[in-house]
Amino acid sequence: MAMAFVGTKSLYSLLVLSHRSNPPAFSFQISHFSSNVALLPSTSLALNRKRRSYCPIRACGLPDKKDDGGRINEPTSVSGSEKRVSWFETLSTFANNNFLPLALVTGVAVGVANPSLGCLADRYYLSKFSTFGIFVISGLTLRTSEISASVEAWPVAVYGLVSILLLTPYFSRLILQIHLQPQEFVTGLAIFSCMPTTLSSGVALTQLAGGNSALALAMTVISNMLGILAIPFSISKFIAAGVGIAVPTKELLRSLVLILLIPLIFGKILRESFKGVADFVDGNRMLFPRISAILLSLVPWMQVSRSRSLLLMVKPKIFLAAIGMGTFLHIALLAFNALGIRTLAAFSGGNKSVFSKRRNVSAVLLVASQKTLPVMVAVVEQLRGALGESGLLVLPCIAAHIVQIIIDSFLVNFWFTSDDSSNNLKVT
């Protein structure tokens, strides 16, 4: 993670340090003591030196409390049950904040530990139903009412779409130059680089960073719609040709339209046609992403169960190398988009350009540098082993998906703390 954090510092100094005109995303609330201290009146006090009263000084910081009879109640110690409740609340908060990564890791672990149930579910095509459900939920939760707010930043949106769909897939060529056994690890990450942006993580992190969430939402919706049409051609051009395998582009396109696009449109039509559906979904914003995460975890569970015998043959250092490749891929995408944004800002008005506004920069940098796992999983399912064993293709991409969220969380937190420290300097 040290390498990831150094990468985020360099990106921040390249992009945001020189643009402080916009208000910060967050502001810490610092509690101050009140300055209106009541002053004692300056009256003369007659001191009786013969009678002195002594007050015992207690070492504890909590004041003694008295009951109705005037007796002092000593502070009670924390019981074991209260400690257990505190630990339970801590674990529950951690699980709520990291539900998707935990669901994915759990699915992989169960598939490795006991593959029989996963193989049975795969035999009855449960993966197709789970993928269908994921994208119905994606359509139900897509809110497009704020997209009009991103119209003024349309040049930034165009750059984001070009980067997601046309430029970043070229990184698959670089990934395929790496020699690693099993080769499916390399091929899987190459496929991952051809995917559109994440369905929810990019928008959520943009909101946390105080960025232009409407712009992030617009890029997410449009790139995933167009990406379903562009993915077959990207895989055929960049990956299949690189490994010497022909991919049935028309069949893959038809499968993606049926498995991804139609459920997405169906969910969106339900949302827009019935106000009660939209209100119910918006009132349960935590429930539907969790259902989607559970459905998504079922797919790698089945794929890993099916490929367990091959996975056990992989050495741990090989898998760590694949995780390192995924980390390097995301940092390379961040650096590429940072350089692109900075270049376009220099040629389109400098500090007055839409590419120089901090809210737009954070939105396009986060969204254009992430890649979606659900679409990648669906694509691998439709390839039916044409590019290798599906479990081996998906496993490094699960790690890469988790790593990119962690890296971007560090990046958002770095923006957060840097903005706050700069505001403190301005105040002083």
Image: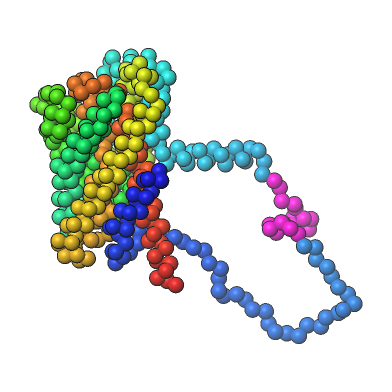
Q: How many marks?
A: 0
Which residue is nearer to you in this view: 68 or 39?
39
What is the quadrant of residue 64 in the picture? bottom right
Task: Tell me the residue at 15%/55% (across/down).
Answer: 155
- Direction from residue 246 to residue 23 in the image, left or right: right
| Quadrant location of the C terminus in the rendered image | bottom left
Which residue is nearer to you in this view: 229 or 51?
229
What is the quadrant of residue 60 in the picture? bottom right
Task: Tell me the residue at 16%/29% (across/down).
Answer: 242
| Quadrant location of the N terminus in the rendered image | top left
Above or below: residue 353 compared with residue 316: below
Above or below: residue 137 compared with residue 385: below
Q: Is residue 107 visible?
A: no
* Residue 5 screen position, x and y as percent: 38, 48
Q: Is residue 71 magenta?
A: yes
Q: Is residue 76 visible?
A: yes
Q: Seen from this angle, which residue lies furthest left?
A: 250
* Residue 264 screen position, x and y as percent: 20, 35
Judged by its main secondary structure, the magenta piece is loop
Task: Tell me the residue at 61%/40% (across/down).
Answer: 83
* Residue 190 screen position, x and y as percent: 23, 33
Looking at the rendering, the stretch of residues picked out in magenta corresponds to 58-77
Which residue is nearer to you in this view: 293 or 414?
414
Task: Tell me the residue at 25%/55% (across/down).
Answer: 361
* Residue 206 screen position, x and y as percent: 30, 50
Q: Is residue 415 magenta?
A: no
- Direction from residue 197 to residue 43 in the image, left or right: right
- Direction from residue 252 to residue 77 in the image, left or right: right
Above or below: residue 171 compared with residue 345: above
